[in-house]
Structure formats: structure tokens, C-alpha cells
Image (tube, grey):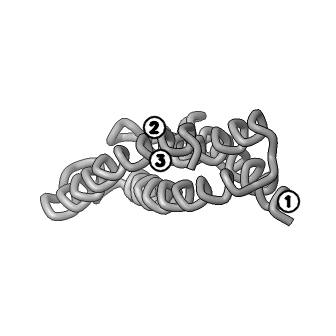
Amino acid sequence: MSPSTLSTAGVLLITVPGVAYGGVTLLTYLMRNVPGYNDNPVRRGLWRAGHAHAGVLVLFSLVALLYIDASPLTDGMKTLVRTLIVAAPILMPLGFFLSVVRPSDTKPSRLIWLTFAGGLSLAAGTLTLGVSLL
């Protein structure tokens, strides 16, 4: 593995306890009936989606890193693809969480667009990587 991939994987692995902490926090909100969570279905749904996307995309990114190093892309393109794929588990959950920060929020703010940015980043990175591997 390249040094860039190893350091990127290290950063991703360090985020896993944060994702786990988020899960415990959501479970605590459920069990303790925290105001602004159970009584706010929009906020509850978006926070659950943010937590789920964070966990799945971190795992996906770790796997994709292996393929990036094996691809015939130039070093610059590998860096770009690595950045695009790793941006998704950051941008998408941020959009879900930050769009309904206040317990009284009943509809997402404009920050929900971060989820779209993360999706575009993921699509561009995986499409580029996939085509390069053919």
C-alpha cells in the first residue's frame, strides 16, 4: 500500500469510535426520551440516516482504498479519487446532522445540500475508479 493510502486508512479508522459514539448517543436519546428527538420525526430520521451513512461509507471507503492503489491511474488521479471517495463519509452525514441541529427544526435547512455534495463526490470517485479498473 502507498503511504497516502495508509495514512488515509488511518484517519478513517480513527473515525470509527466517533461513529460508534454517535450510535450510543442516538440509543441514549431513544431510551431517555430526550425532547427534540423522539417527538421530532424529521430530526430523528435524518440523524438516523446520518449515522447509518457514516458507518457504511467509512467501511466502503476503506475497501475502495485497496482498489485505488491497484488501479492504473496516475498518482494525481489516485489522489483525486481517494479524496472524492473519502469526502463522502464526511459530507453526507454532516448534511444529515447539521440540517436539523436545533431540536425544534421540523424541516431541513440548506445544509442538507452537503448530502448531495457527498453523493456527487462518491459517484465521481467510484465511477472514475471503476472505469480505470476495466
Residue 92 percent location from the top left of the image: 55, 47
Amino acid type of the residue that numbered disc 3 sits on in the rendered structure: Ala
Amino acid type of the residue that numbered disc 1 sits on in the rendered structure: Val
Quickly name the residue at label 1: 131
Q: Is residue 87 left or right of residue 25?
A: right
Mark 2 and mark 3: span between their CA atoms? 25 Å
Residue 65 percent location from the top left of the image: 59, 53
Q: Which of pointers 1 and 2 lies earlier in the amino acid sequence? A: 2
Task: State the SS at label 1.
Answer: helix
Does residue 18 lie above or below 134 as drawn?
above
Numbered tag placed on residue 9 in the rendering: 3
Picture quadrant of residue 2: top right
Picture quadrant of residue 126: bottom right
Q: Quadrant of the C terminus?
A: bottom right
Front tag of 1 and 2: 1
For the image, the number of numbered tags is 3
Quickly name the residue at label 2: 98
Q: Residues within 10 Å of mark 3 (few under 14, many from 20)?
A: some
Q: Is residue 132 left or right of residue 17?
A: right
Q: Residue furthest left?
A: 32
Amino acid type of the residue that numbered disc 2 sits on in the rendered structure: Leu
Residue depicted at 73% across the width and 47% down the height: 120
Residue 109 percent location from the top left of the image: 54, 36
Q: Is residue 125 left or right of residue 5?
A: right
